[in-house]
Image: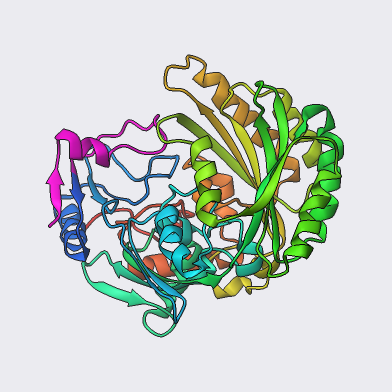
Amino acid sequence: MGQVVSTGPQYDAGRTLWNGAVSSRPGVIVRCAGPAEAQATVLAAQEYGVPLTVRGGGHDWAGRALSDGGLTIDLSGLRRVTVDPETKVAEVAGGATAADLVAATQPFGLTAATGSAGSVGMAGLTLGGGYGPLSGRFGLAADNLLSAQVVLADGSVVTADTEREPELFWALRGGGGNFGVVTSMRVRLHAVPTLLSGLVLFGWEQAGSVLAGLADILSESPDELTVQSGVLPGPDGKPVVFLSPTWSGDDLTVGERALARLDTLGTPLVSQVGSTTVPAMLAGIDAQFPFGRHVEIRTCSVSSLTSGVRDTLSLAGSTLTSPHSAVSLHSLHGAATRVPVSDTAFGNRDPHLMIEIIAQWDPDDTHAAEHRAWAGDLADALEPEALPGGYPNLLGPDAVAQITHAYGPNTERLLTAKHRYDPYNVFHATPLPDPSWIRRTTR
């Protein structure tokens, strides 16, 4: 049975998000045990004219999982993952995290296309796109979605896949949680017996040469090699360049050579690369970016590590204001680029780097304005190099210019699907462009 709470420990748990700076207090949180509670809550929100939000993993930095005085559908208790090793398919409940999914698949020698952090909800990640360490070989998380059970704005429950509600299925893969409540999904799994991954750190004085060398490596990377990179504060508080490679190919000898090449870009301070598992990889990121700190994120995408991008990243490290802030570059290449852009709602299938600027600080830190300014200034400095739009899962509500172009050539079709499935804008997760013909009133 679900729970309806407005005070107490269950209420507090439901309004606790990854970004501790979010202070919204919903009027009521409905902790769902299944689709029935989601249906009832969707209809109640419209009947009483109150805002409706959906909480899955609670990782959206902008806090769109909650609204002051509104109704929140909390799926965080729906964590079940069922694996069929024969068909290589997992049934994933709407509140399951990436860590839940890979923990369930690991005993079968299977894994899934996830993001880089275990605590992120799989539904939200997948619906927005889902860059990750295996996307070069297996595509985005959205590319591995096989079907979704969705509670629509009229309270009906439908299954969306290539044959049933195909237009909804198209929109869900990249269009975000803007069309209904996804209470469960079926996702494709992959056999990856052994992964090679790890972390290589270089001192800041080597930033220019390391990033220049990395640009060459990224331009010729095979599908099996994905390198996440960027800027972190090192153990002594000084900035370092980090490279986090993942080799998912079957030939480990080739993988070892590919990863060893990263060491030759400079003189590493740390080089810890070897065989690992996806659960272990995701846990490492979770430890670095735990729940409860205050967060401000900016994002943009660039075509490559040009000299202008490299210079700006060097500036980012030199001006870090918090020992918890970072810049992370996620590579879209390989299999993810071979999906025709019109096949899903995800708007950019050209090879690119998605840059995630993460300002993060402790709740008692009195310099929040400086940390936010660091993220904003860095985003502004990257603007001349940036491609139109940005990654919808990371765009804040004020990034109007980026939102306008975030879905590329799919914008008109996506907004038509929005008008068809949710004409009264009951659901508003990742930001969509705001055409005048979508009515903003409730029924």
Question: How many discs appear?
Answer: 0
Tell me which secondary structure the magenta stretch mostly adopts. loop
Task: Return the x and y of residue 75 as percentages of the image width and height.
Answer: 28, 54
Q: Position of residue 63 (x, y in %)?
A: 38, 40
Q: Nearer the viewer, residue 208 or 309?
A: 208
Outermost residue toward the top in this view: 366
Q: Relative to residue 294, is residue 385 drawn left or right?
A: right
Residue under the image location 81 percent in, 44 percent down: 263
- The answer to whether residue 241 is left or right of residue 144 is right
Q: Residue at x 60, y 69 (%)?
A: 138
Q: Is residue 330 visible?
A: no
168 left or right of 234 in image: left
Screen quadrant of the N terminus: bottom left
Look at 82% across and 61% down and name the residue there.
Answer: 220
User: Quick check: 114 left or right of 221?
Assistant: left
| Looking at the image, residue 409 lies above or below residue 297 | below
- Residue 46 magenta: no
Q: Quadrant of the C terminus?
A: bottom left
Residue range of the region highlighted in magenta in the rendering? 1-28
Image quadrant of residue 16?
A: top left
Give the residue displayed 71% in from the left and 56% down from the top.
352
Instruction: Give percent across and percent down for residue 302.
Output: 72, 50
User: In the picture shown, does residue 61 fall above or below 259?
Assistant: above
Residue 235, percent from left and from top: 64, 25
With respect to residue 63, does 164 lie above or below?
below
Instruction: State the residue in front, 204 or 42.
Output: 204
